[in-house]
Image (cartoon, helix red, strand yellow):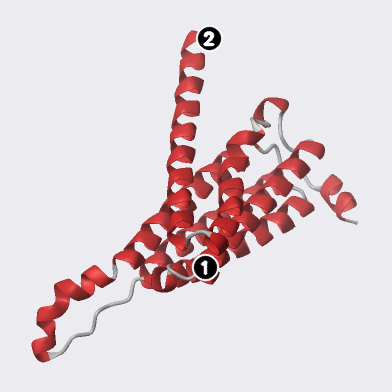
Amino acid sequence: MFEEDEDSETPSERAFDYARTVALSDGVFAIALTLLVFTITFPELQGVARRRLGHELENRLPELFSWALSFAVLGLLWLRHHGFFRDLRTIDARMARLNLVYLALIAFLPYPTRLVGQYGNRSVAVVSYAATVVLIGLVTGWMRIHASRAGLLPPSAVGDWRDHALIPVVFLLSIPVAMFVSADVAKWCWLLAVIVGLLMRGRRRSGARRRRRRS
């Protein structure tokens, strides 16, 4: 049924579907990035207690850490999602459904972010965050596999699977670390993975620019 509908679509209709899907995706990312700031609680001090403002802000450093980490994670995910959709030739019904599942997890991420900010020393909070990122990685892999098999991507856009597996694999490995070693160690593993992921992306883009200059 969906295949018949897709075959009957004109190029302009497919372009319209593509534009709507990308606009929805960017909107969800923008809202999720904005909601992250609300995971940082606001100190409410009255009278003489206002002198403790610096101390109260210091107590919120874990919340600031979880905000910064999630902003970096969502930023990296958006960059990869943007690059992936830029390479797509078109969007079919299955890709649209998979993208909705992906966006649902993106919209959910501020919730475990707040858990980590307030209960970052508890393994259950760290595991909930890591599990969410792992699920996002699994759906991302499913989208890329479908796009490759359905011919939605040109062969040159498939890329190296190791670039996309780094983040979900590190977050997956951090789950037993949080449960049996330390929740703090698991969070530092996340930070290292995000930094490496950003560096790898920058290195890959620099290499692509050099290849374009040579050609």
Taking the spot 44% from the left edge, 44% from the top edge, the residue there is: 192
Instruction: Identify which residue, 128 or 73, lies in the foreground.
Output: 128
The answer to which of marks 2 and 1 sits earlier in the sequence is: 1
Label at residue 111: none
Q: Which residue is mark 1?
A: 123
- Quadrant location of residue 46? bottom left
Taking the spot 29% from the left edge, 70% from the top edge, the residue there is: 60
Q: Residue at the front extreme? A: 181
Q: Alpha-carbon distance for marks 2 and 1?
A: 51 Å
- Eye-nearest disc, 2 or 1: 1
Label at residue 215: 2
**Where residue 188 appears, x then y in whole percent?**
42, 52
Q: Residue at the bottom extreme? A: 47
SS at circle 2: loop
Q: Give the amino acid at mark 2.
A: Ser
**Where residue 36 appears, x then y in whole percent?**
41, 65
Packing grade of label 1 (10 A; few <14, some 14-19, many >=20) is many
Q: Give the amino acid at mark 1.
A: Ser
- Above or below, comparing residue 169 to residue 32 in the picture: above
